[in-house]
Image: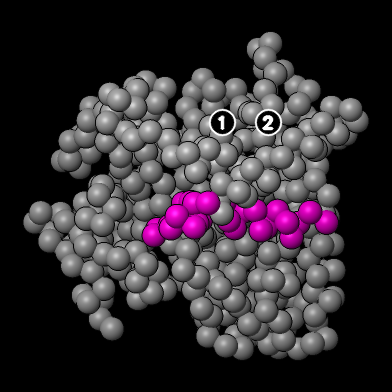
């Protein structure tokens, strides 16, 4: 199938028609992004009914532009914006999202982020390195002698959820249930979601919130040295987090703290195995490991799109926006901008070019980026060192979860 058959583009009108659920697109979106960079990096996506930006400078700028924000109902009413009423079958999901760090703006965002940020700074997560290495080695011990493994279920799924749950103060044995809730929850952010997806997400939000409330009650009675206790007991300018804020923050940290990293472990292993580079050269020391990880984040980012509301009239790349308009930035496409990256579709771990935008930028820069980077920098070298001769057993299948990007399965042998 040719690229031109995947989408239709009118560069003069800046109009794109593309089915985001088309396997020819989501299996390898980078080739489509490259074509868009060549012809029309800013476009109106007909099926999504809004403007999209792929240029590095535009995406980077929009992520930092305070004329655009993650919420708008703090400055305008639904009636004023012509926005429909909340859907009754999503009441639990909407409640869980109401105070999400991903969805709010200052001053609430500043207060919540200040309370949580200390746990995620690099010097703090660095202390988790031995624990992370022990977990990775223990998981590999289980399948090393088998000579083959489906890596996502046996390794990638387990590491990030275990680490973020431990940080927050949730027991390891809850890992499988947290994954089920999270998978149902994040279907809300994917293209082509159905009523069944919405009902499953709402049910997951209710069960997830009920569980978090039970842990909050335990921590109030029996404080511990964990992030949840810290969030419960720490004040910011005389204020404590409400229970709803605690629930929203815990859910978003658990979801964001593992969902993308699971995808990225799989994506990184795949791109390394397909690159032709010898893993021993990619992971020979901390510096080469770090460069390898950053290049894998650039070329196969786990989250592709972030959206913003226009909060006041603005013009970007010749397009005028009014308050209440929605715009989107394709982070994964910005990472392929040929004005910033030479030979952008090639995996080149020795790059010294622009930083990737896979974790976003501005006040909503991913709070878990130091943890995600640590996990990748620790577990990938261990995996390739423990399993020399690692190779793809079957061609990897990309999961139908756009605008996330990850694999359905990653079957390996050695």
Q: What stretch is highlighted in magenta?
A: 173-199
Question: Marks 2 and 1, how far apart in space?
Answer: 9 Å
- Indicate whether residue 358 is drawn in magenta: no
In the displayed structure image, the side of residue 46 where residue 196 appears, left or right: right
- Residue beneath label 1, please? 99
Q: What element carries label 1?
A: loop
Disc on the earlier residue, 2 or 1:
1
User: Mark 2 near mark 1, Cβ–Cβ under 8 Å?
Assistant: no
Screen quadrant of the C terminus: bottom right
Rendered-image quadrant of the N terminus: bottom left
**Along the line of sight, the residue nearer the viewer: 262 or 204:** 204
Where residue 17 sits: x, y (%)? 21, 62
Residue occupying image coordinates x 89% and y 27%? 221
Residue 331 to residue 351: above or below: above
Work out whether residue 303 or residue 241 is closer to the camera in this orientation and state it.
241
What secondary structure is marked by label 2?
A: helix
Please name the residue that numbered disc 2 is placed on. Answer: 246
Figure label count: 2
Relative image position of residue 171 (x, y in whole percent): 83, 49
Numbered tag placed on residue 20 in the rendering: none
Quarter of image, res 144: bottom right
Picture coordinates of residue 44 (x, y %)?
21, 51
- Furthest residue in direction right, as rendered: 222
In the displayed structure, would residue 155 be above or below residue 132?
below
What residue lies at 26% left-to-right and 47% top-to-bottom? 50
**Chief SS of the magenta region:** helix
The residue depicted at 33 percent of the width and 46 percent of the height is 328
- Magenta span includes 186: yes
* Left or right of residue 343, residue 396 in this image: right
Location of residue 212 (image quadrant): top right
Most foreground residue, 84 or 255: 84
Local packing at callout 1 (Cα closer than 10 Å; few below 14, some 14-19, many 20+) is many
């Amino acid at each position: 199938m040719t690229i031109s058959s995947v989408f239709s583009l009118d560069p003069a009108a800046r109009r794109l028609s593309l089915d985001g659920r088309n396997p020819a697109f989501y299996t390898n979106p980078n080739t489509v992004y490259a074509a868009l960079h060549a012809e029309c990096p800013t476009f109106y996506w007909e099926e999504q009914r809004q403007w999209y930006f792929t240029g590095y400078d535009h995406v980077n700028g929009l992520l930092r532009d305070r004329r655009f924000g993650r919420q708008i109902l703090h400055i305008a009413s639904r009636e004023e914006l012509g926005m429909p009423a909340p859907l009754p079958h999503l009441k639990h999901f909407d409640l869980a999202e109401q105070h999400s760090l991903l969805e709010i703006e200052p001053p609430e965002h500043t207060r919540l982020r200040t309370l949580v940020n200390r746990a995620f700074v690099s010097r703090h997560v660095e202390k988790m390195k031995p624990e992370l290495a022990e977990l990775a080695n223990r998981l590999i011990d289980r399948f090393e002698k088998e000579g083959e493994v489906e890596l996502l279920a046996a390794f990638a799924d387990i590491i990030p959820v275990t680490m973020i749950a431990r940080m927050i103060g949730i027991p390891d044995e809850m890992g499988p249930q947290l994954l089920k809730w999270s998978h149902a929850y994040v279907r809300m952010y994917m293209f082509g979601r159905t009523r069944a997806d919405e009902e499953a997400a709402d049910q997951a939000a209710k069960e997830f919130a009920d569980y978090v409330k039970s842990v909050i009650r335990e921590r109030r009675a029996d404080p511990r040295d964990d992030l949840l206790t810290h969030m419960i007991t720490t004040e910011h300018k005389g204020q404590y987090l409400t229970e709803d804020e605690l629930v929203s923050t815990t859910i978003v940290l658990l979801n964001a703290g593992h969902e993308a990293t699971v995808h990225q472990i799989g994506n990184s292993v795949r791109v390394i195995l397909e690159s032709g580079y010898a893993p021993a050269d990619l992971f020979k020391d901390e510096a080469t490991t770090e460069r390898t990880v950053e290049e894998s984040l650039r070329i196969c980012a786990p989250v592709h799109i972030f959206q913003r509301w226009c909060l006041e009239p603005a013009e970007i790349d010749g397009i005028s926006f009014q308050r209440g308009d929605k715009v989107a930035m394709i982070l994964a496409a910005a990472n392929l901008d040929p004005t910033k990256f030479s030979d952008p579709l090639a995996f080149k771990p020795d790059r010294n070019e622009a930083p990737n935008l896979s974790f976003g930028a501005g006040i909503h820069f991913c709070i878990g980026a130091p943890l995600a980077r640590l996990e990748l920098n620790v577990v990938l070298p261990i995996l390739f060192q423990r399993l020399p001769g690692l190779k793809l057993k079957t061609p990897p299948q990309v999961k139908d979860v756009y605008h996330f990007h990850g694999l359905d399965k990653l079957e390996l042998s050695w």
